[in-house]
């Protein structure tokens, strides 16, 4: 009887954790579907504006210099899976494996960075895309 109780508890715990993860992921996606557009480029550091990205460069990590409670960055191009980064801090660290794959699939193509910030009133704002070649 104790063994069956133990397995039931483990199954219940796994189902609970799965539900929390699914809720958290769906909550982020729902929040980004509605946003206000800001007609300016975001302030970031280092400032990569106008830089050409070689296909073998390490991820271009950066800090967003905009006040917000949450941050979302989507990096994408014509081919491959976009890189999505949610952060509670303005420090954006790009996963190296995803970065290398996106660059290798899009040699000579534009790479776009969409930056969203969430304000204290839980509204998302999207800045103009940063475009790199």
Image: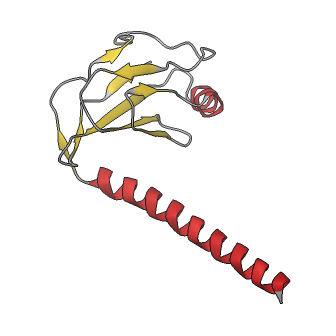
The reply, left or right, for residue 103 in relation to residue 31 is right
Residue 130 locus on image (x, y percent) = 33, 24
Residue 103, quarter of picture: top right
**Residue at 58% across, 29% down:** 99
Residue 90, quarter of picture: top left
Q: Is residue 81 above or below residue 5?
A: above
Image quadrant occupied by the N terminus: bottom right
Residue 123 locus on image (x, y percent) = 20, 48
Q: Is residue 132 above or below residue 33?
A: above
Residue furthest front as drawn? 2
Q: Is residue 41 above or below residue 22?
A: above
The reply, left or right, for residue 39 in relation to residue 105 is left
- In the depicted view, which residue is nearer to us: 47 or 11? 11
Image quadrant occupied by the C terminus: top left
Residue 6 locus on image (x, y percent) = 77, 78
Q: Is residue 32 above or below residue 84?
A: below
Residue furthest bottom as drawn? 1
**Residue at 17% across, 47% down:** 121
Residue 87 locus on image (x, y percent) = 42, 37
- In the depicted view, which residue is nearer to us: 93 or 133? 93
Give the total of numbered labels: 0
**Residue at 45% across, 64% down:** 23
Q: How is the image coloured?
A: secondary structure
Residue 52, quarter of picture: top left
């Amino acid at each position: 009887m104790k063994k069956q109780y133990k397995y039931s508890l483990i199954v219940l715990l796994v189902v609970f954790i799965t539900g929390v993860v699914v809720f958290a992921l769906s909550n982020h996606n729902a929040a980004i579907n509605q946003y206000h557009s800001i007609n300016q480029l975001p302030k970031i550091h280092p400032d990569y504006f106008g830089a050409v990205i070689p296909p073998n460069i390490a991820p271009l990590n950066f800090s967003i210099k905009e006040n917000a409670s949450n941050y979302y960055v989507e990096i994408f191009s014509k081919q491959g899976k976009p890189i999505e980064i949610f952060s509670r801090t303005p420090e954006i660290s790009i996963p190296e494996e995803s970065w290398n794959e996106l660059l290798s699939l899009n040699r000579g193509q534009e790479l776009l960075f969409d930056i969203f910030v969430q304000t204290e009133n839980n509204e998302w704002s999207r800045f103009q895309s940063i475009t790199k070649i």
